Image: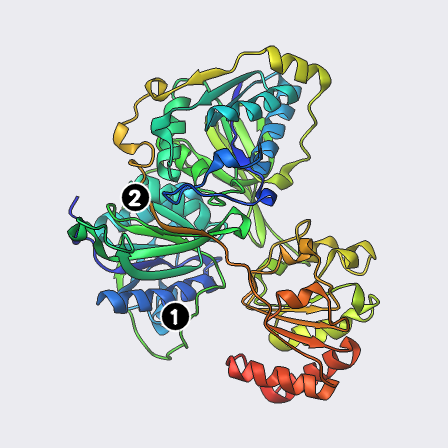
Amino acid sequence: MGLEEYKGVFIYAQQVDNKLSSIAFELIGKAKELASDLGTEVTAVLLGSNVKGLADELGEYGADKVIVVDNPELETYRTEPYAQALAAVINEYKPEIMLVGATAIGRDLGPTVSARVATGLTADCTKLEIGDFPLQPVPGKEDEQKHNQLLMTRPAFGGNTIATIACPDNRPQMATVRPGVMQKLPKEEGRKAEVIEFNPALEKNNRYVEIQEVVKAVGNVQNIMDAKVLVSGGRGVGSKENFQMLQDLADVFGGMVSCSRAVVENGWLAQDYQVGQTGKTVRPQIYFAIGISGAIQHVAGMEESDLIIAINKDEDAPIFQVADYGIVGDLNKIVPALTEALKAEMGK
Amino acid sequence: MNIVVCIKQVPDTKGGVKFNPDGTLDRAAMLAIMNPDDKAGLEAALRIKDETGAKVTVLTMGLPKADAVLREAMAMGADEAILVTDRVLGGADTWATSTTIAGALRNLDYDLIITGRQAIDGDTAQVGPQIAEHLGLPVISYAEDIKVEGDSVIVKRQYEDRYHVVKAKMPCLITALSELNEPRYMTPGGIFDACDKEVTVWGRADLKDVDDSNLGLKGSPTKIAKASDKVPKGAGEKVNLDPAESVAYLIGKFKEKHII
């Protein structure tokens, strides 16, 4: 296999109901950095039915090229026709890097396609960079060290370990990337990508499944695991009614309210909102821990958050051990004042 | 009807993690349990068995001590168990693992293969779909509900904001979510029987249509460059000010971090 034949950073531009998912733009943002290090371009791969119109938006977020596979079989996500289409793109255009979102679609499409094109896949990456493999040259084998490799970093073991992985001998180097971690670029109105229409034949084989029904969630569609900002309350919040204060703060950031186990036990919030070992593991960009003492079971579910702010009247509360910024004080006074100050700053 | 459930013995992540010098996990040094998603997959298979009299075989790839999860599965009601173990299979990534398991499955009659969505050690969710790929089977990932209807399965396939009701012809492969069900307990009689039953042990030579170049650490396209325990996060700054000053302090920090 001529590895040098493989060029360019490709991203899978996920769309659902012919609307691009946020992860598509996040992947372009990261791909631009990688492409700049490699001196190459970013190509978005758009699969669907009547999706060509979405190519412009991908251009505005930084894609240099968009490969569109438009086929009625691709109207609703099904593993097989999508895997055929993406594998055909890879075989035809030979990218050196192929990034896919670690979504419920990407975590099905990614492994299927990587096995089909016989390459490696690293799951749920939180950091991607270009570097050497091995990281340090092996004495006496300096010339065996490979340069310009994709180094893929991911948590494993429920976040207990961090591993950096390379795929030195196969192409493309494939990764799924955790949503909400990479930054999208600012939208550049009118920026155009070169659009390439590609129409591989999709073979209707035994692996097609039949979708009998699509049921969209109603009501509680949001998942605290998807929130970029979580305002989490504990027993110290005092009552169900007081959670409105937390909701107001969350609203400023377009975030969500979550809670500790005690809050669920008191019946103040439903279990869907619980963070921790018996609840959900969250990694928002900002996590407010308000009136939460910080039992180890709670901390296990939120310590990977990018920025942790704790507000608690007990200055010895264990939550302060993991907080980037700890505020000792009365949450009933601080939280509403903070909300107002933020609104003023953000012009809301 | 023949159902094969692929299960994995995983370290209980609460017990802390240990590494070999080459950066791979030292599984031998850690406590082990049946992976939760796999257990839900096994329960789903056993419910189909309860209804239809299907035969349920459990298969695992791992160290010889993975025998324990196979016996647990038989004590829950699985009929047969296969352990795939061989030194040359060690250090496998998801490609090499799925190649190995597919090689073992080629020896079996199956209508339905069930795997867990993901294991709590690697969290990749890759092995199930990759086994299906190697065997040329339809795959339905993230199953919340499984029903057998004639020669097909009807599965509720979970996505972030919806689910699809998907029908697939058997043979096919399904990956199960732990939300699928509440796994049953082992019964005393089951435990007794499970001790007496034989676990079939297969090595490299028993894998069908598999090339050595796709097995174990050497056959893994992904290589670990570095692995480490997560560095515990240290405490940051803590202030004890009046409310207005506290707010001003946080606003300052948000500006510093370009959050606002």
Q: Position of residue A215 (x, y in %)?
A: 60, 49
The correct choice, above or below, for A63 with respect to B259 in the image is: above
Which element carries disc 2, helix, strand or loop? Answer: loop
The N terminus of chain B appears in which quarter of the rendering? top right
Q: Residue at x 45, y 43 (%)?
A: B19
* Distance Cα–Cα, label 2 vs label 1: 30 Å
Q: Residues within 10 Å of mark 1 (few under 14, many from 20)?
A: some
The three-letter code of the residue at mark 2 reads: Thr
Q: Choose between A28 and A319: the one closer to the eye.
A: A319
The C terminus of chain B appears in which quarter of the rendering? bottom right
Chain letter for mark 1, please.
A
- Same chain? Circles 2 and 1: yes
Mark in front: 2 vs 1: 2
Q: Earlier in the sequence, mark 2 or mark 1?
A: 1
Q: Position of residue B235 (x, y in %)?
A: 60, 68
Q: Choose between B111 and B257: the one closer to the eye.
A: B257
Colouring used for the render? rainbow
Q: Position of residue B258 (x, y in %)?
A: 50, 81
Q: Is residue A288 left or right of residue B166?
A: right
Q: Quadrant of residue A70?
A: bottom left
Q: Choose between A277 and A35: the one closer to the eye.
A: A277
Chain letter for mark 2, please.
A
The three-letter code of the residue at mark 1 reads: Glu
Q: Which mark is residue B88?
A: none
Q: Residue at x 52, y 30 (%)?
A: B7
* Residue named by callout 1: A57
Q: Residue at x 42, y 70 (%)?
A: A184
* Residue named by callout 2: A119
The correct choice, above or below, for A199 with respect to B58 in the image is: below
The correct choice, above or below, for A208 with respect to A200 in the image is: above
Residue A53 visible, this orientation: no
Q: Is residue A49 left or right of residue A195?
A: right
